Image: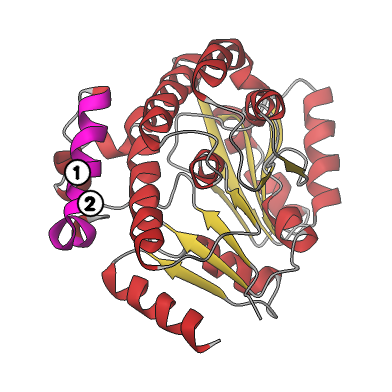
Amino acid sequence: MSKKVAFIFPGQGSQSIGMGEDFYNSSDIAKEMIKKAGERISVDFQEILFKENELLGQTQYTQPAILLVSCIALKLFQERSDIKPDFVLGHSLGEFSALVAAGAIDYLDAIELVHKRGLFMNEACDGIGAGMMALVGLDDETVETMTKEQRESGKKIWAANYNLDGQIVVAGMKSDLESLVDTFKNAGAKRAIVLDMSVASHCELLSSAVDKLNPYLEQFITNNFNCDVISNVTAKNYNTKDEAIDLLGRQLISPVKYKHSIKEHNNVDFFIEFGNGAVLKGLNRKIIKSIPTLNISDTKSLEDTLTKLDEN
């Protein structure tokens, strides 16, 4: 019986110095992909990925770097396995990697696209004091009610990432977030931590980035989908260029429904995470324990994943 698998891809926050280096040292394919990606946006990805630097922390470089490592992991898997995904999904930025896996965009076009996306996000938040906060221990309804009440009182704060039950990231003005730490804790939050970020992802503060991004979505995304993509915005599947353009624009200003996507699309034997670390594997283990998540972040994990798939 053929295996049903979903390919999944991490987003911003999964980056670390040294990511992809094992692939680079052991694969000519990885070397070529890194070289071409660097040429596409005129950066030295060996410098950004493998050496201590400040660029990896800047979102216009973070995003293409994460996508590049995910696409290398995907390509090396595809060289060794004929397993096709039943569907693909990603966390925020990872949805663009998922589009590569679905055949709807070439990886080099995606590198340029997410580089632009990062620039536009930076421009939208430049100088306004934007930020994000991680909340642990509050349910969705409580966070949604509290953020709505705070907006009605004049503060700018929105739910941004639904990662797990009891784990939500909120976005908005950093001063507003900082002023509400005790408020969230008094409501029952075990942790309320303002993150070291200057961009407020997935909220209305990025509205100006949507119109800037749309022409590039139109330019680079095709209708050549070979499987469904699960939208961060709706947690539903899509498979056309028009849907992708609409949903990826809305994704900038809408919360990421990651846990909803995993809960609603669990009719698979395995999830396979492609990219640095194993962030989504860790989330999936808590969201839906009955389905294993394999991961491919270096040559060893690639071999381990191939072995486990052959055994099952």
CB within 8 Å, label 1 to label 2:
yes
Q: Is residue 181 left or right of residue 196?
A: right
Extreme bottom residue here?
311
- Residue annotated with mark 2: 29
What label does residue 202 carry, if any?
Answer: none
How busy is the neighbourhood of tag 1: few (under 14 within 10 Å), some, or many (20 plus)? few
Q: Is residue 92 above or below residue 8?
A: above
Horizontal and vertical percent position of residue 196? 43, 41
Look at the image and tell me in which quarter the N terminus lies.
bottom right
Horizontal and vertical percent position of residue 226? 60, 45
Q: Nearer the viewer, residue 212 or 167?
A: 212
Residue 222 included in the magenta stretch of the image: no
Q: Residue at x 58, y 37 (%)?
A: 178
Q: Is residue 67 above or below residue 25?
A: above
Residue range in magenta is 22-40
Res 276 visible: no
Q: Is residue 64 left or right of residue 219?
A: left
Q: Is residue 139 left or right of residue 80?
A: right
- Residue annotated with mark 1: 32
Q: Residue at x 61, y 52 (%)?
A: 88
Horizontal and vertical percent position of residue 301? 35, 73
Identify residue type, mark 2: Ile
Q: Nearer the viewer, residue 178 or 273?
A: 273
Identify residue type, mark 1: Glu
Q: Residue at x 42, y 53 (%)?
A: 14
Horizontal and vertical percent position of residue 146? 81, 40
Question: What is the spatial separation of the Cα atoms under label 1 and label 2, in whole angstroms?
Answer: 5 Å
Q: Is residue 110 above or below residue 16?
A: above
Q: Residue at x 75, y 57 (%)?
A: 138
